[in-house]
């Protein structure tokens, strides 16, 4: 065992945060029998987003090596939990249900390929190399993708952006959920349309393998029944999608033949308002966007989406919506409030003050304008 652990014994090239490091003994997902175990050790960088030099994490020079000879001083840490003292890690994988947003589906995923054998279903998602490298500077590769799988339904998503799944739908047959595998690998292929015939390229890709259950062995007519419209809507858990799918099969959809663009927009606005009240601002933005497809000159929808962008720190997008709404309805005081907040977020403080003053001229009885001006001046 000591020989096997020797490669991870020594001085690290950069600092880590001991409080966020962990280890665990887990089942080897590549062992079909489920008998093998593996040691998993995760070290959390003290400075996330910064790549470490070289391919190794341990200093390789002779005098940088340390032995496993533990003594009392190695368990001592200073009162702040930092410094050169040692910390004994608690066993067990840390909870990571609150994943940070790293990259979106639209940026990272380039192509989708799918295939099957009598026993397996396989999906291959070709990835953008630059966006993948940027994501790997922030989180380890196994924290980028996630999947939920039941016997008949499947969801593949980017962690931190679960509401915009890569794949979501009903499978063409039944699978064994516990044997689902995700593998980040590369694909070497010929460049189609290149002026030099035979030119090859190597691209990163995510390969997903689902194992068909005994009752579903053989060739399926369709691997995954997915609705493009569904993928463009904010989604919840796989269980919620499965429940909605089964309920839709039982209940007829409402008659919308006589609906006007305003009716379609109101339906999406209602969903957006509900998502906003629950604090799901990204979902609300998606619904407001769908509503604006039907009524693109609705200044209230633009104002509401602007607030959504403000909530997630997308100040330029918030400003774009505010200015568009201002062009549509220049006498509406509230839109100047949105514009001023977006400009302040962009650190354009003088412009922000000017926007608040313009709004104050339309609504002089509202004391909130003066408070916003004060906040802006203090933020300089």
Image: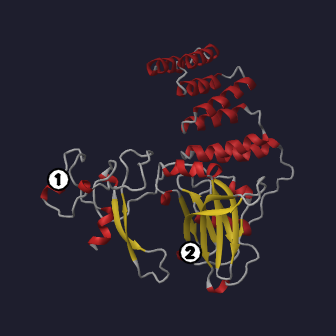
Decide if residue 95 is on the left or right side of residue 243: left
Residue ID at (60%, 27%): 338
In the rendered image, which residue does mark 2 sit on? 177
Q: Pick whichever, 276 or 173, lies toward us.
A: 173
Q: Which mark is residue 113?
A: none
Q: Pick whichever, 316 or 128, lies toward us.
A: 128
Name the outermost residue toward the left: 72
In the rendered image, which residue does mark 1 sit on? 76
Decide if residue 31 is on the left or right side of residue 258: left
Q: Secondary structure at mark 1?
A: loop
Q: CA distance from mark 1 to mark 2?
A: 44 Å
Residue ID at (58%, 18%): 351
- Please tell me whether residue 352 is drawn above or below residue 277 in the rendered image: above
Residue ID at (63%, 70%): 153
Quarter of the image for the N terminus: give it.
bottom left
Residue 378 quadrant:
top left
Residue 225, image x and y in percent? 72, 68
Residue 326, image x and y in percent? 70, 24
Residue ID at (45%, 81%): 34
Q: Residues within 10 Å of mark 1 (few under 14, many from 20)?
A: some
- Please tell me whether residue 191 is drawn above or below residue 287 in the rendered image: below
Decide if residue 143 is on the left or right side of residue 16: right
Q: Residues within 10 Å of mark 2 (few under 14, many from 20)?
A: some
Q: Secondary structure at mark 2?
A: helix
Residue 177 quadrant:
bottom right
Q: Is residue 243 visible?
A: no
Q: Is residue 185 visible?
A: yes
User: Which is nearer the N-term, disc 1 or disc 2?
Assistant: 1
């Amino acid at each position: 065992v000591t020989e096997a652990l020797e490669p991870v014994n020594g001085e690290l090239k950069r600092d880590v945060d001991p409080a966020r490091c962990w280890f665990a003994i887990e089942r080897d997902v590549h062992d079909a029998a489920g008998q093998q175990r593996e040691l998993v050790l995760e070290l959390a960088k003290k400075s996330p987003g910064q790549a470490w030099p070289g391919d190794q994490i341990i200093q390789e020079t002779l005098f940088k090596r340390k032995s496993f000879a533990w003594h009392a001083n190695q368990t001592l840490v200073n009162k702040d939990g930092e410094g050169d003292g040692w910390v004994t890690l608690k066993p067990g994988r840390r909870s990571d249900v609150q994943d940070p947003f790293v990259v979106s589906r639209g940026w990272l995923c380039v192509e989708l390929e799918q295939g099957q054998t009598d026993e397996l279903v396989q999906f291959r998602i070709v990835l953008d190399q630059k966006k993948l490298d940027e994501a790997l500077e922030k989180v380890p590769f196994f924290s980028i993708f996630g999947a939920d799988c039941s016997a008949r339904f499947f969801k593949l998503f980017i962690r931190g952006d679960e509401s915009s799944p890569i794949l979501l739908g009903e499978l063409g047959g039944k699978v064994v959920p516990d044997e689902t595998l995700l593998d980040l690998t590369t694909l070497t292929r010929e460049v189609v349309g290149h002026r030099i015939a035979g030119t090859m390229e190597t691209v990163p890709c995510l390969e997903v393998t689902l194992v068909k259950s005994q009752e579903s062995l053989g060739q399926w007519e369709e691997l995954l029944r997915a609705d493009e419209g569904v993928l463009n809507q904010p989604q919840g858990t796989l269980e919620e999608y499965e429940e909605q799918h089964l309920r839709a099969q039982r209940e007829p959809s409402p008659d919308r033949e006589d609906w006007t663009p305003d009716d379609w927009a109101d339906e999406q606005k209602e969903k957006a308002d509900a998502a906003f009240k629950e604090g799901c601002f990204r979902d609300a933005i998606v619904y407001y966007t769908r509503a604006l497809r039907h009524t693109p000159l609705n200044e209230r929808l633009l104002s509401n989406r602007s607030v959504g962008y403000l909530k997630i720190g997308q100040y330029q997008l918030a400003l774009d919506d505010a200015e568009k709404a201002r062009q549509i309805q220049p006498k509406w005081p509230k839109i100047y409030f949105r514009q001023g907040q977006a400009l302040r977020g962009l650190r354009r403080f003088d412009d922000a003050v000017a926007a608040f003053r313009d709004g104050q001229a339309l609504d002089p009885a509202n004391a909130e304008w003066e408070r916003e001006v004060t906040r802006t001046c203090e933020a300089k």
